[in-house]
Image: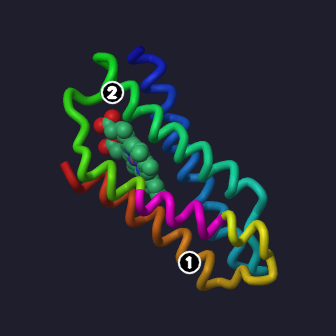
């Protein structure tokens, strides 16, 4: 289960990297690159699966910090909502919109790494 957990963590990090990189790459036009929706859904699903695995097996950290993961889930849900809106209404995608998506990813990276 540890291997599966670690594979999920790799996909989790790649997912957020795609969202962050995609949001920055789209700034020029501005537009939401197609991969951003896939990246955010990958990261959201892998994050939830990691919590499930850590709770039900010996994989992952000894104890999940539910407050931390709950806040991360909330931030990720808002980011996902914004991305889904942007995909449905491409004309509404502005630089501020993309900056908001990238900022929420940075916020969650900071929460993930700094809150221990
Ligand atoms: C914008 C959203 C998110 C970002 C940017 C993000 C980022 C990260 C980063 C950078 C790590 C590695 C931290 C480390 O190993 O020190 C991590 C780990 C993790 N994330 Fe996320 N995450 C996000 C959303 C979520 C969500 C929604 C969940 C679950 C509901 C989640 C669950 C986890 C778990 C379980 C770990 C592994 C912790 C460990 O093994 O110690 N993440 N995340």
Q: Position of residue 59 (x, y in %)?
A: 33, 20
In the figure, is residue 53 to the left or right of 16? left
Residue wearing tag 1:
99
The magenta segment: 74-83
Question: What residue is shown at x 56% (from left), y 77% (from top)?
Answer: 99
Mark 2 burial class by Cα count in 10 Å: few <14, some 14-19, many 20+: some
Magenta span includes 79? yes
Residue at disc 2, CB closer than 8 Å to ligand 1: yes
Q: Nearer the viewer, residue 39 or 86?
A: 86
Residue 18: x percent and y percent?
A: 62, 53
Determine whether the residue tagged by mark 2 lies in a helix, strand or loop: helix
In the rendered structure, the answer to whether residue 78 lies left or right of residue 60 reads: right
Q: Is residue 1 above or below residue 68?
A: above
Q: Check if residue 19 falls in the magenta segment.
A: no
Tag 2 residue: 54
User: Left or right of 68: which side holds 96?
Assistant: right
Measuring 58% from the left and 47% from the top, which residue is drawn there?
A: 15
């Amino acid at each position: 289960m540890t291997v599966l957990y670690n594979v999920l963590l790799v996909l989790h990090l790649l997912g957020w990297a795609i969202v962050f990189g995609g949001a920055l790459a789209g700034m020029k036009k501005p537009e939401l690159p197609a991969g951003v929706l896939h990246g955010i859904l990958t990261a959201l699903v892998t994050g939830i699966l990691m919590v499930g695995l850590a709770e039900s097996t010996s994989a992952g950290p000894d104890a999940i910090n539910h407050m931390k993961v709950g806040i991360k889930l909330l931030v990720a849900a808002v980011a996902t909502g914004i991305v889904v809106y942007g995909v449905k209404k491409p004309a509404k995608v502005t630089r501020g919109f993309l900056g908001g998506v990238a900022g929420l990813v940075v916020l969650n990276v900071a929460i993930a790494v700094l809150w221990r």
